[in-house]
Image (spheres, grey):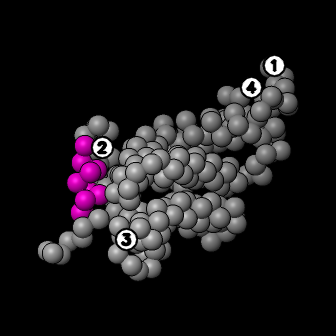
Amino acid sequence: MTDRPYHHGDLRAALLAGAERALAARGPAALSLRELAREAGVSHAAPGRHFRDKSALLDALALNGFERLTSQLAAAAAEPGDTRDGLLALARVYVSFALRNAALLDLMYSRKHEPDAPEELTAAVGRLLDTMMGIITEGQRAGEITAGDPEVVAFTVAAALHGFAAFNSTTAPEEADALLPGVIDVLASGLLPR
């Protein structure tokens, strides 16, 4: 038997990348710190320096997903344009992320509801909602979105996008993207006749 090294250049990042690949391929139940250590070429004890157990690994994976998604949403929100353009840009980012990372997104939302979810995860969810609320509050200030609680509006937009992504999980990304302008128009104009 060959001894495996304990040290690795960036073991935490390697473990998270391996966990994300395994999650997409086999689901969260199949994740194993021992297997991830083997794939990273380190001893089975080495992951313990970064994750006390599988639950901590799953929390870190969810946190990483929220941070990546929020970063992408923030970049989209910073693009010039009116509120509708901003909402469409956010929608495209969210749906694209959801379609490319379905297993990760499921994990992200399931971990945030765990009774012992770490504060960092709760804060990351808050930053994601703040990013979405930013475009809502800007739209309200510009008179492009009706007045009201921006949190309720942002929650409605987020729920619609999450549902849209779930319903289109087997749709080709370009087909889903082609439907998004209509979805944003319905969100922006409402359902009642004017």
Judged by depth in the image, the label closer to the viewer, 2 or 3, is 3
- Report the front residue among 165 and 39: 165
Distance (Cα) linking label 2 and label 4: 40 Å
Left or right: 170 as drawn, with respect to 72 = left
Q: Is residue 41 left or right of 109 when viewed as pictured?
A: right
Span colored in magenta: 178-187
Task: Give 28 or 187, whichever is nearer the viewer.
Answer: 187
Secondary element type, mark 3: loop
Give how far across and how far down residue 143 sits, in percent: 37, 71
Q: Main secondary structure of the magenta part?
A: helix
Which comes sooner in the sequence, label 4 or label 3?
4
Q: Is residue 182 magenta?
A: yes
Query: Which of the pair 101/150 is nearer the observer?
Result: 150
Sort mark 4 into few (<14), some (14-19) or many (20+) by Cα contacts within 10 Å. Answer: some
Judging by the rendered image, the residue that carries numbered circle 2 is 177
Return the residue at label 3.
Answer: 143
Q: Could you give the CA–CA distance between mark 4 and mark 1, rounded to whole angstroms?
A: 11 Å
Q: CA distance from mark 1 to mark 2?
A: 49 Å
Residue 99 location (% of width, % of height):
39, 44
Q: Which mark is residue 2?
A: 1
Q: Badges 2 and 3: C-beta atoms under 8 Å apart?
A: no
Point out residue 151 in the picture as x, y percentages from the top left corner.
47, 74
Q: How far across and down, in percent of the image, does residue 93 sit?
A: 43, 46
Residue type pointed to by label 4: Gly
Query: Which one is in front in this view, the residue at disc 4 or the one at disc 1?
Result: 4
Residue type at mark 2?
A: Asp
Q: Earlier in the sequence, mark 2 or mark 4?
A: 4
Numbered disc 2: secondary structure: helix
Tell me which residue sits at (24%, 48%) in the image. Answer: 179
Give the residue furthest to the front.
142
Q: Which badge, 2 or 3, is on the more N-terminal residue?
A: 3
